[in-house]
Image: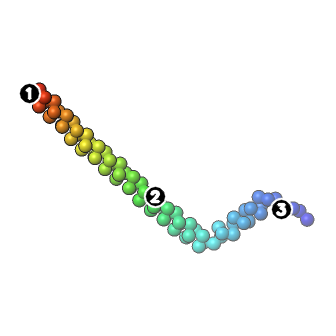
Amino acid sequence: MKKQPKVDILLRIIDIPLNNPFTFVLGGAVLGLALVITGFIFDLAVLTTFGGILLGLTVGGIAIIYAALRICIGFWR
């Protein structure tokens, strides 16, 4: 009796769920859900990045205008 290699046994174990079409449907659903979740995370990250940039520009702009006004008022005296 010839002994089966371990690779053949492993391939048979892997082949059992691959012959089942439900496995592909379930895998597609899980992959789709993962894409949706990562899309939301990416979208949130992009929006918070743009929000942070706009907030930084606004606060920085106000600080620059305030400093410029203080300098101008100092020169007027």
Residue in the picture at 21% in, 41% down: 62
Q: Earlier in the sequence, mark 2 or mark 3?
A: 3
Circle nearer the viewer, 2 or 3: 2
The quarter of the rendered structure image containing the N terminus is bottom right
**SS class, disc 3:** loop
Query: Total of numbered circles in the picture?
Result: 3
| Circle 3 residues within 10 Å: few <14, some 14–19, many ≥20 | few
Q: Quadrant of residue 21?
A: bottom right
| Circle 2 residues within 10 Å: few <14, some 14–19, many ≥20 | few
Mark on residue 77? 1
Residues under numbered marks 1 and 3 in contact, where contact means CB atoms less than 8 Å apart: no
64 or 31, nearer to the observer: 64
Q: Earlier in the sequence, mark 1 or mark 2?
A: 2
Using the image, determine if residue 13 lies above or below residue 56.
below
Q: Earlier in the sequence, mark 1 or mark 3?
A: 3
Q: Which residue is mark 3?
A: 4
**SS class, disc 1:** loop
Pinpoint residue 29: horizontal percent, then vertical percent. Answer: 51, 68
Q: Which amino acid does the dot numbered 3 rest on?
A: Gln
Residue in the picture at 21% in, 36% down: 64
Q: Which amino acid does the dot numbered 1 rest on?
A: Arg
The quarter of the rendered structure image containing the C terminus is top left
Q: Is residue 56 left or right of residue 14?
A: left
Q: Which residue is mark 2?
A: 38
| Circle 1 residues within 10 Å: few <14, some 14–19, many ≥20 | few
Residue in the picture at 35% in, 52% down: 48
Q: Which amino acid does the dot numbered 2 rest on?
A: Thr
